[in-house]
Structure formats: C-alpha cells, structure tokens
Amino acid sequence: MLAFAQAQPSAFIQLVPIVLIFGIFYFLLIAPMRKRQKAVQQMISDIKKGDRIVTSGGLHGEVTAVLDSAVLVKVADNVKVKISKSAISGLQGSEGDGR
C-alpha cells in the first residue's frame, strides 16, 4: 500500500475562520456598544439647566446647575443633590417612562 501524503492547508486558509469570528463579534457586539457609548457621552455633555434626568441609581430630578464634572439636581422642594455626570443614565422621558 502506498501512503499518500496529506497536503497541509495554507496559513491564510487557517486564519479565515478566526478573522470571520472577529468580524461577526465586531459588527454584532462591539460596534453597537461603541455607538451607544458615544450617544450617552453626547447626551451628558449637552445637559443644561431645566433638563429632567434619571441617574443610574434610579433617582429622578431636575437639573438646577451644571458644574465641571457634576450637576446639582432638585429632587424635591428645597432638596438639591450634587451628582456626578458619570452617574446620569438618561433624560426622563427618553427611555419610554410613559410621559
């Protein structure tokens, strides 16, 4: 019996599945996440006095002043809280809260 040598696939053919998997992950996971992150950063930089916000902790209130890295939020009559801009998760009404 003759033993036939099997040809080894080229390096390019071996890398195709890895590149394909990375491409799928990029378009399904990484790109949408980066787009959402940019939108949130833009929303935070555009916050102004009078906007109604929601924090990541669930606190709802109205912005009374915008500082460098924080905002003052009125949560009740005569109650103002200083909140870091990074804790703001969105504007009230933009996430479909029924208003």
Image: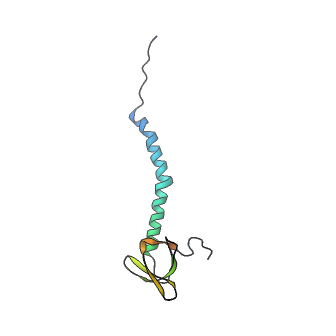
For residue 45, which quarter of the picture?
Answer: bottom left
- Residue 67: x percent and y percent? 38, 80
Q: Of residues 77 and 13, which is closer to you in this image?
A: 77
Is 57 drawn above or below residue 26 in the view shown? below
Which residue, as the protein is rendered here, is positioned at the far left?
A: 68
- Residue 80: x percent and y percent? 46, 84
For residue 69, which quarter of the picture?
Answer: bottom left
Specify how the rendered protein is coloured.
rainbow
Q: Residue at x 52, y 73 (%)?
A: 58
- Residue 92: x percent and y percent? 54, 76
- Residue 61: x percent and y percent? 51, 80
Which residue, as the protein is rendered here, is positioned at the far top?
A: 1
Is 16 drawn above or below residue 76 in the view shown? above
Q: Residue at x 44, y 12 (%)?
A: 2
Q: Of residues 56 and 39, which is closer to you in this image?
A: 56
Quadrant containing the C terminus is: bottom right
Please state the total of marks drawn on the protein image. 0
Is 23 drawn above or below residue 64 in the view shown? above
